[in-house]
Amino acid sequence: MTGRQYLYIVILVFAVTAVISLIWYKFKGKSAFLVFGTLSAFFLRLNYVIYTPHWIRQHDVIGFGNEEGQAAYIEWFLHERRLPDFDPVTRWGFFQPPLHHIISAVFIGIQTFFGKNYNAACENVQYLTLFYSMCILFFAYLIFKEAGLEGNTLITAFLLCAFHPGFILFSGSINNDCLCELLMVMSLYFALRWYRKSTILNIIPIALCIGLSMAAKLSGCLAAAPVAFLFIVKWIDGKREGFFRYLWQYLIFALICIPPAVFYPVRNLIRFGTPLNYTPEVGEPVGSNPLLFRFFDIRTDTPFVSLISNGQAYDEFNIPLAMLKTSLFGDCYLAEEHIKMIPFAWAALILGAVLALIAVFATIYVTVKALRKKENVIETVFWFLSWLTPVVFLINFSIQAPYFSSQDFRYIQYVIVIEALFLGLFSKGNKKKEAACFCLTLLFSAASSAVYILLGKP
Protein backbone atom coordinates (compact mmCIF):
# COMPACT_ATOMS: atom_id res chain seq x y z
CA MET A 1 0.00 0.00 0.00
CA THR A 2 1.37 3.42 -0.91
CA GLY A 3 1.34 6.36 1.48
CA ARG A 4 -1.36 8.07 -0.58
CA GLN A 5 -3.57 4.96 -0.55
CA TYR A 6 -3.16 4.72 3.22
CA LEU A 7 -4.25 8.33 3.76
CA TYR A 8 -7.21 7.86 1.40
CA ILE A 9 -8.39 4.90 3.48
CA VAL A 10 -8.01 6.82 6.74
CA ILE A 11 -9.91 9.80 5.31
CA LEU A 12 -12.64 7.47 4.04
CA VAL A 13 -13.03 5.84 7.46
CA PHE A 14 -13.38 9.19 9.21
CA ALA A 15 -15.76 10.45 6.52
CA VAL A 16 -18.01 7.43 7.07
CA THR A 17 -17.79 8.03 10.81
CA ALA A 18 -18.81 11.66 10.32
CA VAL A 19 -21.78 10.65 8.15
CA ILE A 20 -22.95 8.15 10.78
CA SER A 21 -22.63 10.88 13.42
CA LEU A 22 -24.63 13.37 11.35
CA ILE A 23 -27.40 10.80 10.86
CA TRP A 24 -27.38 10.18 14.60
CA TYR A 25 -27.45 13.94 15.21
CA LYS A 26 -30.71 14.10 13.24
CA PHE A 27 -32.36 11.93 15.88
CA LYS A 28 -30.35 12.33 19.07
CA GLY A 29 -28.90 15.84 18.99
CA LYS A 30 -25.57 16.28 20.75
CA SER A 31 -25.19 12.53 21.16
CA ALA A 32 -23.69 12.64 17.65
CA PHE A 33 -20.45 13.92 19.15
CA LEU A 34 -20.33 10.94 21.49
CA VAL A 35 -20.96 8.55 18.59
CA PHE A 36 -18.29 10.27 16.51
CA GLY A 37 -15.87 10.23 19.45
CA THR A 38 -16.44 6.55 20.15
CA LEU A 39 -16.13 5.41 16.54
CA SER A 40 -13.14 7.67 15.88
CA ALA A 41 -11.42 6.48 19.05
CA PHE A 42 -11.94 2.89 17.97
CA PHE A 43 -10.65 3.47 14.44
CA LEU A 44 -7.61 5.37 15.71
CA ARG A 45 -6.75 2.58 18.13
CA LEU A 46 -7.46 -0.16 15.59
CA ASN A 47 -5.35 1.63 12.99
CA TYR A 48 -2.50 1.92 15.51
CA VAL A 49 -2.73 -1.79 16.34
CA ILE A 50 -2.71 -2.78 12.66
CA TYR A 51 0.43 -0.82 11.76
CA THR A 52 2.31 -1.49 15.01
CA PRO A 53 4.09 -4.87 15.44
CA HIS A 54 3.94 -6.31 18.94
CA TRP A 55 7.62 -5.55 19.64
CA ILE A 56 7.46 -1.85 18.63
CA ARG A 57 6.92 0.93 21.20
CA GLN A 58 6.52 -1.56 24.02
CA HIS A 59 7.67 -1.61 27.64
CA ASP A 60 9.52 -4.65 29.02
CA VAL A 61 8.02 -6.88 26.29
CA ILE A 62 11.10 -7.66 24.10
CA GLY A 63 9.11 -10.05 21.87
CA PHE A 64 7.79 -13.58 21.57
CA GLY A 65 10.34 -16.34 21.13
CA ASN A 66 12.78 -14.82 23.63
CA GLU A 67 13.85 -16.00 27.06
CA GLU A 68 13.04 -12.77 28.88
CA GLY A 69 10.47 -9.99 28.81
CA GLN A 70 6.72 -9.94 29.28
CA ALA A 71 6.11 -11.68 25.95
CA ALA A 72 8.26 -14.57 27.19
CA TYR A 73 6.27 -14.45 30.44
CA ILE A 74 3.07 -14.94 28.42
CA GLU A 75 4.67 -17.86 26.59
CA TRP A 76 5.69 -19.41 29.90
CA PHE A 77 2.04 -19.71 30.90
CA LEU A 78 1.07 -20.87 27.43
CA HIS A 79 3.57 -23.73 27.40
CA GLU A 80 4.19 -24.54 31.09
CA ARG A 81 0.69 -23.76 32.43
CA ARG A 82 1.99 -22.98 35.93
CA LEU A 83 3.62 -20.19 37.89
CA PRO A 84 7.40 -19.86 37.53
CA ASP A 85 9.22 -22.39 39.72
CA PHE A 86 12.28 -20.12 40.04
CA ASP A 87 13.00 -16.72 41.52
CA PRO A 88 11.11 -14.48 39.05
CA VAL A 89 13.57 -11.61 39.42
CA THR A 90 16.20 -13.71 37.64
CA ARG A 91 14.31 -13.40 34.34
CA TRP A 92 13.37 -9.95 33.14
CA GLY A 93 9.67 -9.18 33.33
CA PHE A 94 8.72 -12.30 35.30
CA PHE A 95 8.42 -10.43 38.62
CA GLN A 96 5.13 -8.86 37.47
CA PRO A 97 1.83 -10.26 38.82
CA PRO A 98 0.54 -12.71 36.23
CA LEU A 99 -3.15 -11.94 35.54
CA HIS A 100 -2.67 -10.19 32.18
CA HIS A 101 -0.10 -12.74 31.06
CA ILE A 102 -2.34 -15.69 31.91
CA ILE A 103 -5.28 -14.13 30.04
CA SER A 104 -3.01 -13.46 27.05
CA ALA A 105 -1.71 -17.03 27.10
CA VAL A 106 -5.27 -18.37 27.12
CA PHE A 107 -6.15 -16.02 24.25
CA ILE A 108 -3.23 -17.31 22.18
CA GLY A 109 -4.09 -20.90 23.05
CA ILE A 110 -7.71 -20.51 21.93
CA GLN A 111 -6.60 -19.05 18.59
CA THR A 112 -4.06 -21.80 17.88
CA PHE A 113 -6.59 -24.46 18.91
CA PHE A 114 -8.83 -23.26 16.09
CA GLY A 115 -5.98 -23.31 13.59
CA LYS A 116 -4.58 -19.79 13.79
CA ASN A 117 -0.92 -19.40 12.90
CA TYR A 118 1.13 -19.13 16.12
CA ASN A 119 2.94 -15.90 15.17
CA ALA A 120 -0.35 -14.29 14.11
CA ALA A 121 -1.98 -15.43 17.35
CA CYS A 122 0.81 -13.78 19.34
CA GLU A 123 0.45 -10.59 17.32
CA ASN A 124 -3.28 -10.60 18.05
CA VAL A 125 -2.65 -10.10 21.78
CA GLN A 126 -2.84 -6.42 20.85
CA TYR A 127 -6.56 -6.88 20.26
CA LEU A 128 -6.91 -7.70 23.96
CA THR A 129 -5.30 -4.41 24.95
CA LEU A 130 -7.36 -2.63 22.28
CA PHE A 131 -10.45 -4.03 24.01
CA TYR A 132 -9.16 -2.91 27.42
CA SER A 133 -8.46 0.58 26.07
CA MET A 134 -12.00 0.93 24.69
CA CYS A 135 -13.42 -0.35 27.99
CA ILE A 136 -11.57 2.46 29.80
CA LEU A 137 -13.38 4.92 27.53
CA PHE A 138 -16.72 3.23 28.27
CA PHE A 139 -16.27 3.40 32.05
CA ALA A 140 -14.99 6.98 31.76
CA TYR A 141 -18.32 7.83 30.12
CA LEU A 142 -20.22 6.10 32.95
CA ILE A 143 -18.20 8.06 35.51
CA PHE A 144 -18.94 11.36 33.76
CA LYS A 145 -22.66 10.56 33.70
CA GLU A 146 -22.71 9.51 37.36
CA ALA A 147 -20.87 12.71 38.31
CA GLY A 148 -23.53 14.85 36.62
CA LEU A 149 -21.80 15.96 33.41
CA GLU A 150 -24.14 16.60 30.51
CA GLY A 151 -24.29 18.49 27.23
CA ASN A 152 -21.07 20.25 26.24
CA THR A 153 -19.25 19.37 29.46
CA LEU A 154 -19.91 15.66 28.93
CA ILE A 155 -18.77 15.91 25.30
CA THR A 156 -15.56 17.75 26.25
CA ALA A 157 -14.59 15.24 28.96
CA PHE A 158 -15.44 12.30 26.73
CA LEU A 159 -13.49 13.60 23.71
CA LEU A 160 -10.41 14.23 25.86
CA CYS A 161 -10.39 10.56 26.87
CA ALA A 162 -11.35 9.35 23.39
CA PHE A 163 -8.48 11.11 21.62
CA HIS A 164 -5.80 11.26 24.30
CA PRO A 165 -2.67 9.63 22.78
CA GLY A 166 -1.88 7.71 25.96
CA PHE A 167 -4.90 5.49 25.41
CA ILE A 168 -3.97 5.03 21.75
CA LEU A 169 -0.55 3.79 22.85
CA PHE A 170 -2.20 1.55 25.44
CA SER A 171 -4.25 -0.15 22.74
CA GLY A 172 -1.12 -1.60 21.16
CA SER A 173 0.93 -2.19 24.31
CA ILE A 174 0.86 -5.86 25.24
CA ASN A 175 2.29 -5.46 28.73
CA ASN A 176 0.12 -5.36 31.83
CA ASP A 177 -0.45 -1.59 32.15
CA CYS A 178 -3.73 -1.32 30.26
CA LEU A 179 -5.56 -4.11 32.10
CA CYS A 180 -4.43 -2.78 35.47
CA GLU A 181 -5.61 0.74 34.71
CA LEU A 182 -8.92 -0.44 33.29
CA LEU A 183 -9.62 -2.26 36.55
CA MET A 184 -8.64 0.83 38.55
CA VAL A 185 -11.08 3.01 36.58
CA MET A 186 -13.76 0.36 37.10
CA SER A 187 -13.08 0.26 40.84
CA LEU A 188 -13.57 4.04 41.09
CA TYR A 189 -16.86 3.82 39.20
CA PHE A 190 -18.18 0.97 41.34
CA ALA A 191 -17.01 2.74 44.52
CA LEU A 192 -19.17 5.74 43.62
CA ARG A 193 -22.12 3.43 42.97
CA TRP A 194 -21.56 1.72 46.32
CA TYR A 195 -21.35 5.04 48.17
CA ARG A 196 -24.77 5.99 46.83
CA LYS A 197 -26.26 2.58 47.57
CA SER A 198 -24.16 0.77 50.15
CA THR A 199 -25.12 -2.88 49.79
CA ILE A 200 -23.07 -6.07 49.87
CA LEU A 201 -23.83 -6.69 46.20
CA ASN A 202 -22.43 -3.27 45.33
CA ILE A 203 -19.21 -3.70 47.31
CA ILE A 204 -18.27 -6.99 45.62
CA PRO A 205 -17.37 -5.40 42.23
CA ILE A 206 -15.03 -2.95 44.01
CA ALA A 207 -13.26 -5.80 45.77
CA LEU A 208 -12.90 -7.76 42.54
CA CYS A 209 -11.61 -4.78 40.57
CA ILE A 210 -8.99 -3.69 43.12
CA GLY A 211 -7.88 -7.26 43.82
CA LEU A 212 -7.60 -8.12 40.13
CA SER A 213 -5.90 -4.81 39.27
CA MET A 214 -3.16 -5.71 41.74
CA ALA A 215 -3.08 -9.22 40.27
CA ALA A 216 -2.26 -7.49 36.98
CA LYS A 217 0.18 -4.94 38.41
CA LEU A 218 0.89 -3.92 42.00
CA SER A 219 0.29 -0.23 41.20
CA GLY A 220 -3.40 -1.18 41.18
CA CYS A 221 -3.26 -0.44 44.91
CA LEU A 222 -3.40 3.29 44.05
CA ALA A 223 -7.17 3.01 43.70
CA ALA A 224 -7.43 1.77 47.29
CA ALA A 225 -6.81 5.16 48.95
CA PRO A 226 -9.86 7.04 47.58
CA VAL A 227 -12.02 3.92 48.04
CA ALA A 228 -10.85 3.64 51.65
CA PHE A 229 -11.89 7.27 52.14
CA LEU A 230 -15.47 6.42 51.12
CA PHE A 231 -15.42 3.36 53.38
CA ILE A 232 -14.35 5.43 56.39
CA VAL A 233 -16.92 8.15 55.69
CA LYS A 234 -19.72 5.60 55.45
CA TRP A 235 -18.58 3.90 58.63
CA ILE A 236 -18.55 7.19 60.53
CA ASP A 237 -21.91 8.28 59.12
CA GLY A 238 -23.42 4.91 60.01
CA LYS A 239 -22.81 5.65 63.69
CA ARG A 240 -23.58 2.93 66.21
CA GLU A 241 -26.37 1.16 64.32
CA GLY A 242 -24.34 0.99 61.11
CA PHE A 243 -21.05 -0.10 62.68
CA PHE A 244 -21.53 -3.85 62.38
CA ARG A 245 -23.44 -3.62 59.10
CA TYR A 246 -20.51 -1.91 57.38
CA LEU A 247 -17.96 -4.01 59.28
CA TRP A 248 -19.55 -7.10 57.74
CA GLN A 249 -19.33 -5.54 54.26
CA TYR A 250 -15.68 -4.60 54.75
CA LEU A 251 -14.81 -8.12 55.89
CA ILE A 252 -16.41 -9.51 52.72
CA PHE A 253 -14.49 -6.92 50.72
CA ALA A 254 -11.20 -7.99 52.32
CA LEU A 255 -11.90 -11.70 51.78
CA ILE A 256 -12.49 -11.09 48.06
CA CYS A 257 -9.87 -8.41 47.43
CA ILE A 258 -6.79 -9.44 49.41
CA PRO A 259 -6.06 -12.97 48.09
CA PRO A 260 -5.65 -12.06 44.39
CA ALA A 261 -3.98 -8.77 45.30
CA VAL A 262 -1.13 -10.17 47.40
CA PHE A 263 -0.88 -13.84 46.43
CA TYR A 264 1.94 -13.55 43.91
CA PRO A 265 4.28 -11.18 45.82
CA VAL A 266 3.71 -13.05 49.10
CA ARG A 267 4.39 -16.38 47.35
CA ASN A 268 7.64 -15.02 45.94
CA LEU A 269 8.64 -13.57 49.30
CA ILE A 270 8.10 -16.92 51.05
CA ARG A 271 9.66 -19.12 48.36
CA PHE A 272 12.48 -16.94 47.05
CA GLY A 273 12.86 -14.02 49.46
CA THR A 274 11.77 -11.50 46.81
CA PRO A 275 10.90 -8.13 48.45
CA LEU A 276 7.18 -7.37 48.36
CA ASN A 277 7.73 -4.05 46.60
CA TYR A 278 10.50 -5.26 44.30
CA THR A 279 11.12 -2.86 41.42
CA PRO A 280 14.19 -3.18 39.19
CA GLU A 281 16.35 -0.11 38.57
CA VAL A 282 16.10 0.52 34.84
CA GLY A 283 16.51 3.36 32.42
CA GLU A 284 18.80 6.34 32.09
CA PRO A 285 19.93 7.81 35.47
CA VAL A 286 18.81 11.43 35.92
CA GLY A 287 19.42 11.88 39.66
CA SER A 288 22.55 13.96 39.16
CA ASN A 289 20.39 16.95 38.19
CA PRO A 290 19.45 19.30 41.07
CA LEU A 291 15.96 18.67 42.43
CA LEU A 292 14.95 22.25 41.59
CA PHE A 293 15.89 21.65 37.95
CA ARG A 294 13.85 18.46 37.92
CA PHE A 295 10.72 20.57 38.40
CA PHE A 296 11.42 23.97 36.87
CA ASP A 297 13.92 23.51 34.03
CA ILE A 298 11.47 23.31 31.13
CA ARG A 299 13.89 23.75 28.21
CA THR A 300 13.09 21.47 25.31
CA ASP A 301 14.00 21.40 21.65
CA THR A 302 11.73 18.49 20.75
CA PRO A 303 8.09 17.61 21.47
CA PHE A 304 9.25 14.07 22.19
CA VAL A 305 11.30 12.99 25.20
CA SER A 306 14.94 14.04 25.08
CA LEU A 307 17.31 11.09 25.28
CA ILE A 308 21.01 10.92 24.53
CA SER A 309 20.36 7.57 22.84
CA ASN A 310 18.07 9.41 20.40
CA GLY A 311 20.72 12.02 19.60
CA GLN A 312 19.65 14.76 22.02
CA ALA A 313 22.00 16.55 24.38
CA TYR A 314 20.61 15.14 27.63
CA ASP A 315 18.23 12.61 29.13
CA GLU A 316 14.81 14.04 30.04
CA PHE A 317 14.96 14.87 33.74
CA ASN A 318 12.22 17.45 34.34
CA ILE A 319 9.50 15.40 36.05
CA PRO A 320 6.36 17.35 34.98
CA LEU A 321 7.66 17.73 31.41
CA ALA A 322 8.57 14.04 31.20
CA MET A 323 5.13 13.12 32.50
CA LEU A 324 3.48 15.30 29.84
CA LYS A 325 5.63 14.06 26.97
CA THR A 326 5.37 10.38 27.86
CA SER A 327 1.60 10.70 28.26
CA LEU A 328 1.43 11.90 24.66
CA PHE A 329 4.20 10.06 22.81
CA GLY A 330 5.63 7.43 25.14
CA ASP A 331 9.40 7.25 25.37
CA CYS A 332 10.07 7.01 21.60
CA TYR A 333 11.39 9.62 19.18
CA LEU A 334 8.50 9.34 16.74
CA ALA A 335 9.94 11.88 14.28
CA GLU A 336 12.35 9.19 13.09
CA GLU A 337 9.36 7.36 11.63
CA HIS A 338 7.64 10.28 9.92
CA ILE A 339 9.16 13.77 9.84
CA LYS A 340 5.90 15.45 8.74
CA MET A 341 4.26 14.76 12.10
CA ILE A 342 6.55 17.17 13.98
CA PRO A 343 4.34 20.31 13.63
CA PHE A 344 1.33 18.30 14.84
CA ALA A 345 3.39 16.87 17.70
CA TRP A 346 4.36 20.39 18.79
CA ALA A 347 0.70 21.42 18.62
CA ALA A 348 -0.32 18.39 20.69
CA LEU A 349 2.39 19.14 23.27
CA ILE A 350 1.49 22.83 23.62
CA LEU A 351 -2.27 22.23 23.69
CA GLY A 352 -1.76 19.26 26.03
CA ALA A 353 0.27 21.45 28.40
CA VAL A 354 -2.42 24.14 28.39
CA LEU A 355 -5.16 21.58 29.03
CA ALA A 356 -3.10 19.94 31.78
CA LEU A 357 -2.59 23.28 33.56
CA ILE A 358 -6.29 24.13 33.27
CA ALA A 359 -7.24 20.65 34.49
CA VAL A 360 -4.96 20.89 37.53
CA PHE A 361 -6.36 24.33 38.34
CA ALA A 362 -9.90 22.99 37.80
CA THR A 363 -9.23 20.04 40.13
CA ILE A 364 -8.12 22.31 42.96
CA TYR A 365 -10.76 24.97 42.25
CA VAL A 366 -13.70 22.55 42.16
CA THR A 367 -12.52 20.80 45.34
CA VAL A 368 -12.01 24.04 47.28
CA LYS A 369 -15.36 25.36 46.07
CA ALA A 370 -17.14 22.19 47.22
CA LEU A 371 -15.49 22.40 50.65
CA ARG A 372 -16.28 26.10 51.01
CA LYS A 373 -19.92 25.80 49.96
CA LYS A 374 -20.35 22.37 51.58
CA GLU A 375 -21.93 20.99 48.41
CA ASN A 376 -21.27 17.41 47.31
CA VAL A 377 -18.19 17.41 49.53
CA ILE A 378 -17.63 13.68 49.93
CA GLU A 379 -17.82 12.77 46.27
CA THR A 380 -15.67 15.74 45.26
CA VAL A 381 -12.99 14.83 47.81
CA PHE A 382 -13.19 11.23 46.57
CA TRP A 383 -12.38 12.34 43.03
CA PHE A 384 -9.71 14.71 44.31
CA LEU A 385 -8.01 11.83 46.15
CA SER A 386 -8.37 9.69 43.02
CA TRP A 387 -6.29 12.35 41.25
CA LEU A 388 -3.87 13.28 44.05
CA THR A 389 -2.85 9.76 45.10
CA PRO A 390 -1.37 8.62 41.75
CA VAL A 391 0.19 12.03 41.00
CA VAL A 392 1.99 12.10 44.37
CA PHE A 393 2.99 8.46 43.88
CA LEU A 394 4.59 9.12 40.49
CA ILE A 395 6.39 12.29 41.62
CA ASN A 396 7.73 10.48 44.69
CA PHE A 397 8.71 7.46 42.58
CA SER A 398 10.58 9.76 40.18
CA ILE A 399 12.55 11.26 43.07
CA GLN A 400 13.19 8.03 45.00
CA ALA A 401 14.17 6.08 41.87
CA PRO A 402 15.82 8.81 39.76
CA TYR A 403 15.74 7.15 36.37
CA PHE A 404 14.09 8.38 33.19
CA SER A 405 11.66 5.43 33.14
CA SER A 406 10.37 6.33 36.63
CA GLN A 407 8.82 9.49 35.18
CA ASP A 408 6.68 7.64 32.63
CA PHE A 409 3.03 8.72 32.82
CA ARG A 410 1.82 5.28 31.70
CA TYR A 411 1.94 4.17 35.33
CA ILE A 412 -0.95 6.55 36.09
CA GLN A 413 -2.52 7.08 32.65
CA TYR A 414 -6.02 6.65 34.12
CA VAL A 415 -5.58 10.05 35.79
CA ILE A 416 -6.64 11.54 32.43
CA VAL A 417 -10.17 10.31 33.20
CA ILE A 418 -10.16 12.19 36.52
CA GLU A 419 -8.70 15.34 34.97
CA ALA A 420 -11.34 15.22 32.21
CA LEU A 421 -14.03 14.93 34.89
CA PHE A 422 -12.77 17.97 36.80
CA LEU A 423 -12.44 19.91 33.54
CA GLY A 424 -16.12 19.20 32.90
CA LEU A 425 -17.17 20.09 36.45
CA PHE A 426 -15.14 23.32 36.27
CA SER A 427 -16.80 24.56 33.07
CA LYS A 428 -20.30 23.26 33.85
CA GLY A 429 -22.93 26.01 33.77
CA ASN A 430 -20.64 28.67 32.29
CA LYS A 431 -21.08 29.04 28.50
CA LYS A 432 -17.73 30.78 27.96
CA LYS A 433 -15.80 28.17 29.94
CA GLU A 434 -17.67 25.36 28.17
CA ALA A 435 -16.86 26.81 24.76
CA ALA A 436 -13.20 27.45 25.60
CA CYS A 437 -12.64 23.95 27.03
CA PHE A 438 -14.47 22.33 24.11
CA CYS A 439 -12.42 24.23 21.51
CA LEU A 440 -9.12 23.45 23.23
CA THR A 441 -10.04 19.78 23.51
CA LEU A 442 -11.13 19.64 19.87
CA LEU A 443 -7.85 21.20 18.67
CA PHE A 444 -5.84 18.88 20.91
CA SER A 445 -7.77 15.88 19.61
CA ALA A 446 -7.14 16.89 15.99
CA ALA A 447 -3.40 17.36 16.57
CA SER A 448 -3.10 14.05 18.43
CA SER A 449 -5.04 12.21 15.73
CA ALA A 450 -2.78 13.67 13.03
CA VAL A 451 0.33 12.41 14.84
CA TYR A 452 -0.90 8.84 15.13
CA ILE A 453 -2.37 8.76 11.60
CA LEU A 454 0.92 9.99 10.09
CA LEU A 455 2.86 7.56 12.28
CA GLY A 456 1.28 4.70 10.34
CA LYS A 457 1.75 6.25 6.89
CA PRO A 458 3.90 3.91 4.74
Image (cartoon, rainbow, N blue to C red):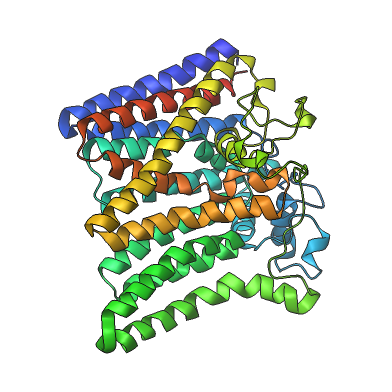
Residue 201: % across, % down = 33, 74
Question: Which residue shows up at 71% across the image and 68% down it?
Answer: 82
Between 177 and 318, the residue placed more toward the observer is: 318
Residue 410: % across, % down = 58, 45
Instruction: Indicate left or right for 159 with 55 as reference.
Output: left
Between 74 and 29, the residue placed more toward the observer is: 29
Quadrant for residue 378, please give it.
bottom left
Figure quadrant of the C terminus: top right
Question: Which residue shows up at 54% across the image and 61% down it?
Answer: 220
Identify whether 285 is placed above or below 218. above
Between 7 and 153, the residue placed more toward the observer is: 153
Residue 421 seen from this side: no
Residue 200: % across, % down = 33, 77
Identify whether 58 is placed above or below 75. above
Quadrant for residue 149, please give it.
top left
Figure quadrant of the N terminus: top right
- Taking the view exactly as shown, the residue that stands out farthest to the left is 27
Question: Which residue shows up at 54% across the image and 46% down it?
Answer: 129
Question: Which residue shows up at 61% across the image and 41% down it?
Answer: 295
- Taking the view exactly as shown, the residue that stands out farthest to the top is 4
How many numbered callouts? 0
Identify whether 262 is placed above or below 163. below
Instruction: Indicate left or right for 401 with 151 as reference.
Output: right
Instruction: Indicate left or right for 5 with 142 as reference.
Output: right
Quadrant for residue 271, please give it.
bottom right
Between 162 and 288, the residue placed more toward the observer is: 288
Residue 164 seen from this side: yes
Residue 331: % across, % down = 66, 36
